[in-house]
Image (cartoon, helix red, strand yellow):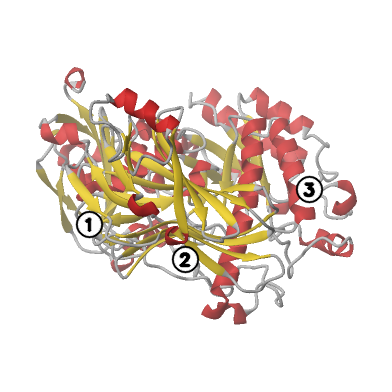
Amino acid sequence: MIILNSNSLPSSLSLAAAVLFAWSSLAAAESASVGNEFIQREVSWVGGRLSTISIANRAGQSEVRAGGGDEFAITMRTEGSTTEHRLTASDFTVSGSLPGREDSSVDVRLAGHGAPLDVVVRYSAKPGEPWIRKQLIVTAREPLQITKAEVEHLGVADGYAPYQADQFTARGAAQWRPPLGQPVYTRTSGTWWGIEFPAARNEVKDGTLICGYLTRVELKPGETWKSHPSMVGVSDSPTFIKDAFLDYIDATRARPLRLQTQYNCWFDYGKAVDTAKFTASVRKLNEELVTSREMPPLRAYVIDDGWQDTTKDWSKTGVWPVNAKFENNFAQAREEVARAKSALGLWLSPGCVFGGQPAIPKMREAGWRTLDPWMSMTGDAYMDALEKRMVELAASGVAYFKLDGVFGHLNTRNFDVEGFKGSEAELNDARYDEAKERYLSLGSERLMKIFKRMGAANPNVYIVISNGAFLSPWWLQHVDAVWMINAGDAAKGADRTGELVYRDAAYFKLASTTGDNTQFPLNSLFNHEPKKTTTGEDAEVFRRYLLMSLSRGTGLVELYLKTFELSESDWDVLADGMKWVHRVFPAFKRARMIGGDPKHGEVYGYTGWNEAAGYLSLHNPSDETREFPIVLDRTLGLPKSAVSGGRSYVVSTPFAADAGSLPKTATAGQTLMITLPPRAIRIMEYTNSAPGKTQ
C-alpha cells in the first residue's frame, strides 16, 4: 500500500484518483506512507527537505518517532580532489515523487544545491512481509568517487546495538570480532534495522541510528549507482525481536535452510588424499551407513586440501588446477560419489591462505596483487580468475564448497592496506580500522558477485565461508553457512566432556547476552564437528557426545572420521545419530543455546521448536549433581500459538537408560525441573500430542 499526501490535492479525490493525480503532478505531494498490514513508514518533504516522520509497528501496536537525523548521507570526492564532502538530505530539495509500479513503493527525487550528483530515495514494501526497504540511487553530474553511504541516519530514542564487540585485529589468536553486519534493535517499539550487506556498520550513536558502509565507487557523468538497501522490520514484542529478525533472514537467504550431511576426508588423509584413498572412503561410508544401516545418503563427500596443483603458473593455466592425484574433472571420484547417491564437494582457499601459497610467487611476478603471503581479495586479476574457476566447478556439478581462508584464519588476518604487506601486528592499531573496514567491504562485495554466479550455475550448490570470515547474518543471502569464528578446527579436551566444553564455551561466548551476543542463526554455523578418530571408546559415551554435538542445531553436519579404524559399534552409533538429526532437523530453524557458561561448569544446552515438535538437550559438565529448571515458553523458542494455546506434548528421549527419569508429558507454559548427575547429558524430544489442533 502506498499513499501520497498533499495539501493541494482536492479532498474529494478517491485514493486511486489521488495516486493518478500524483503521477501527473509530481511536485504536488508533500508526504507518503509506504507499508502493509504489518509495518508503515511515513516520510515527508514539506518545505522540500526529505525526512522520515515515523515507523508504525502494526504487528506490535507501537511506533518509532524519528526525531531528527540526516535521513541519509553520501560521502564523496570530486575528480582530482582529496577532500571528502558529506552530503545529507538537507543538501537537496525534493523535486518530485513517483509511486512504484509494483507492490508498495515510492521514489522520492532530490536535486542538489550545486551538488555534483542527484539522488532518488526509494522506499518499498511487499504484501505479507513485515519489513520495508530503503535504497539510494545516485546519478553523477561530473566525475566523482563515492566513499561511504549512510542509507539510514535517524534520531531514534530507543535504539540499541545488541552486538558490542569491536576487534579488527590483524594478529591475535581468537581475536576476530569485526563490528560489521549486525542488526540494531529498538527497546520499546520492537523494530530491527540494518543494511542488506555483510560488511555494513549498523550502530546507534548518541540516540542516532546509523546504517551505512564504506565503499569505493567511481562514477562518470550520467552514470548511476545503487546502494545496498537498508531494512527496517517489526516484531509483535520487543522481547522477541531477535526471533523476528532471524525469521527475515530465513525468508531472504540465498537458498532455503536444508540439512547438509557430508563426509570430509581431512582426518583420514590430510594432504595425502588421492583418488584411490578418497573413493575407498566413499565406498566404506556408504556401505556401513547407508546400505547396512539404512541411513539416508550423505549429501556430499568432500575432498579437502591436497587436490590442487601448485607447481603450475596459475596466472597462465588458471587458478586452482587439479594435480596428478586426480583426473582433471575428478572423474573417478564423481563416479564413486554418484554410486553413493551423493555429490562431490571441494575444499578451496579463496585467499590462498591455505594450500595455495606455493603458487603465489608466479602470480606476483605476473603483476597480480598479492599480500604477504596471501592474495588480495580485491585484486582484479586474481579475483576474476577465481570467479571463473569457481563458477566452472559449480557448473560441472561440484555441489559443496568449503572456502577456507577468506580474510585470514584463527590467529592472523590480512588486509590490503596501502604501505603494509597485510598482516603486521602494527595493523592492530585502531587508527587503521577504517582502511581495514574498507578492504573487508570491497572484498565482501567481490565475493558476493562470485557467489551469485555460482548459484546461477548450480541452484543447489552449498557454500560455506570458513576461516577468516566474520559472522554477519546477511552473508546468508549469498552463502549457506559461516564458520563460527574464534574456535579451532579440533575441539580441545582430555575426554568427550572436555571436547564439548571447549566448543560449547565458544558457542556461549558467541551467542549469549553476556558474551558477544552475535545475532546469527545457530542453524547456519560451521563448527568442525562431530569427529570420530579412535576406536575402543565406550558406545554410550560416544552416543551422548554425538547427539549433544548435533543438538547445537547446525544444518551443516560434516563428519570427520578415521574411516577404516571404526568398529561395528562405532558405525551403529554414528548411523543412529545421523538418523536422529534427520528426525529433529525441522526444529533447527529456531535453534538456540540455553543455560550458563560451560567453561565455568554451569549447566547449559540447546533447544529448537516448530509447530509440530521440539527438542532440548542439557549437559552438566561439573562433578556435582545439578538441578535445572525449564519453562516451556516463547523464551525457550516455543511458537506463540503453542504457548497461548497451552499445547500438550509427549516427551521421549533417544537414550533408553534415561526414559524412567524424565517426564512422559509436558504442557506449554509449564515449568519442569531436570536433575543432572555429574557430567550427565540429557536429550528430550517433544511431540505435539494433538497435531491436528495446531492449524
Which x, y percent locates residue 343? 63, 30
* Mark 1 Cα-neighbour bin, 10 Å: few <14, some 14–19, many ≥20: some
Q: CA distance from mark 2 to mark 3?
A: 30 Å
Pointer 3: what residue? Answer: 385
* Amino acid identity at mark 1: Arg
Nearest the camera: 255 or 279? Answer: 255
Tell me the element at label 1.
loop
Q: Dividing the picture into quarters, in which one does residue 636 lie?
A: top left
User: From the viewer's perspective, is the residue at label 2 or at label 1 nearer?
Assistant: 1
Tell me the element at label 2.
loop
Say which residue appears at 37% left-offset and 67% top-offset. 164
Does 122 appear above or below 444?
above
Q: Dividing the picture into quarters, in which one does residue 252 lie?
A: top left
Nearest the camera: 452 or 224? Answer: 224
Pointer 1: what residue? Answer: 187
* Amino acid identity at mark 3: Ala
